[in-house]
Amino acid sequence: MSVTNVVWSGGQAYASIHKVHGQILALIGGREKVRTWVLQGSGEGLGAAAGDIKEWGMATAQLKGRGLWRLCLPIVRSRLRRKLQEEAARVLLLDGIGVARLCVPLLNDLPDVRALVVFHGVTRLRPADIRLLRRFPADRLQLVAVSAALAASLHKQLERPVIALRTAIDPQQFQSALLDGAAARQALQAPAAESPLLGAVGRLVPEKGYATLLEALALLVGKGIRLHLVIVGEGEQRPVLEAKIRQLGLAGHVTLAGHRADVARLYRAFDLMLTPSRNEGLGLVVQEAVMAGVPVVCSDLPVFVEQIGAAGVYLAPDDVAGWAAAIERVLAEGGASLAARQYRELAPEQAWEAFCRGYRALLAADSIRT
């Protein structure tokens, strides 16, 4: 069996997708050939599991078939088809609807190839997408969502089966790489340990809800509570957040740490992890924090409830007063017991076993031809 993993782009913004696809590809036996196509950008940093990497160097307009590029789509697909035939590909692992729009039509002319589309986030499908994904039976095309909530949303739109296979992380491997609290703080150049350190991890974009955290922090600092917030991530909203930090008088209380490739090792720097997202396909940072023994306060998204259930502390993404009160309460009570409850609810060992078992079955040569 030859597997071709096709991702939309390289780069920091897609790191979590690359991590998930890397974990899937790592489950493939050594006798199988793995290749990864990066449609735009660099494939640097994808990891050994990605196998041989080909960078196609396509423009966004070309990938989306905009303007005159629409006329070129048959030529682009012909190049892709010839390459798949040359590589004797049998399974396509496709990153979401954007890649599926380009690659799923290739199945028409490649009868021995089947495709697995992994949906990583909230997706609003076009009528043409729905027609495309309904065109092929389950022995040619399977759809997988990284959470049950996402699978339900996609099933409602598509009216065809979508497998809910929650993304998980190997807890033993993850925990063995963690730095202790002091070393992690030092790596982040965070303040001394006498001030509780709040953490948030993710791209600096509006849907991550970081403006709410800054306003909640301002309420707490205004009460004389000593706190420091470190946000690890980079993105388009940096100037907006920097201006808000100045406006709220939080210059000495917030660090925008930028992108850190080693962020998965640094969770134990934090006394409390905060995830106020407005939408998520899954939100791996919640799993990572819990596995690091750090208590989590998060927004009331179904994907977070799916992971930590009754042990979660959930708030509406824009409830500034609620976030401030929850942070103060958890820190006052001490987070150890909450972290332990969240770990039991997440059950990372069982989740990892289910992830491995599920994808091994999907990738097996005869798994969808029965």
Image (cartoon, rainbow, N blue to C red):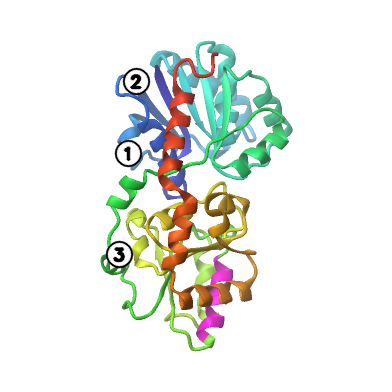
* Residue in the picture at 60% in, 20% down: 138
Q: Earlier in the sequence, mark 1 or mark 3?
A: 1
Is 216 magenta? The answer is: yes
Under circle 3, the secondary element is helix
* Residue in the picture at 42% in, 58% down: 289
Label 1 neighbourhood size at 10 Å, few (<14), some (14-19), many (20+)? some
Q: Nearer the viewer, residue 4 or 219?
A: 219
Under circle 1, the secondary element is loop
Q: Earlier in the sequence, mark 2 or mark 3?
A: 2
Q: Residue 348: x percent and y percent?
A: 43, 47
The three-letter code of the residue at mark 3 reads Ala
The three-letter code of the residue at mark 2 reads Glu
* Residue in the picture at 44% in, 13% down: 85
Q: Is residue 202 visible?
A: no
User: Magenta region: which residues?
Assistant: 210-221
Q: Which mark is residue 47?
A: 1
Under circle 2, the secondary element is loop
Q: Are marks 2 and 1 in contact (CB under 8 Å)?
A: no
**Residue at mark 2:** 32
Q: Which mark is residue 184?
A: 3
**In this rendering, position of residue 318 left or right of residue 83:** right
Residue 218 sits above or below residue 336 on the image = below
